[in-house]
Image: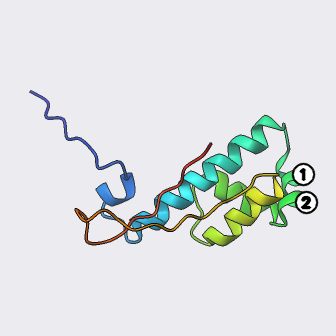
């Protein structure tokens, strides 16, 4: 019989990758950037001009290789693509000792 193991919701944490929370946030931001570029039918060269990133960096980011791109730069890309970005800081529930970072798209 095959045993099924349920994930935590963060594949990076499940794979025990360092900086798992940061990697998940970057993956979510990169996915959103990619979906906007696709919806606008932009080439990577056109995206490069808009985002202020070299085309090879955009290619890497869209393929999940975003270690060299900061969360701040990804947020800047979303702003350049016409998105408002809001950062909300609130108290964590008492049931958790630490806070968490999550990305919410409306």
- Which residue is at the front of the view, 76 or 18? 76
The picture places residue 36, in percent across and down from the top left corner, at 75, 43
The picture places residue 94, in percent across and down from the top left corner, at 25, 65
Q: Residues within 10 Å of mark 1 (few under 14, many from 20)?
A: few
Q: Is residue 70 visible?
A: yes
User: Pointer 1: what residue?
Assistant: 46
The structure's colour scheme is rainbow
Considering the numbered disc 2 on the image, is that residue within a helix, a strand or a loop?
Answer: helix
- Which residue is at the front of the view, 62 or 6? 6
**63 relative position to 40: left or right:** left
Q: Residue at x 69, y 59 (%)?
A: 85
The picture places residue 75, in percent across and down from the top left corner, at 69, 63
Q: Residue at x 37, y 68 (%)?
A: 99
The reply to whether dot 2 and dot 1 touch (C-beta < 8 Å) is yes
The picture places residue 105, in percent across and down from the top left corner, at 60, 46
User: Pointer 2: what residue?
Assistant: 49
């Amino acid at each position: 019989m095959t045993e099924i193991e349920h994930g935590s919701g963060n594949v990076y944490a499940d794979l025990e990758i360092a900086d798992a929370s940061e990697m998940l946030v970057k993956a979510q931001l990169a996915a959103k950037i990619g979906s906007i570029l696709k919806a606008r039918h932009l080439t990577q060269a056109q995206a490069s001009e808009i985002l202020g990133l070299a085309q090879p960096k955009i290619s890497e980011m869209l393929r999940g290789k975003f270690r060299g791109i900061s969360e701040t730069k990804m947020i800047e890309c979303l702003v350049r693509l016409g998105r408002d970005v809001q950062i909300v800081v609130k108290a964590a529930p008492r049931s958790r000792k630490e806070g968490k970072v999550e990305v919410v798209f409306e």
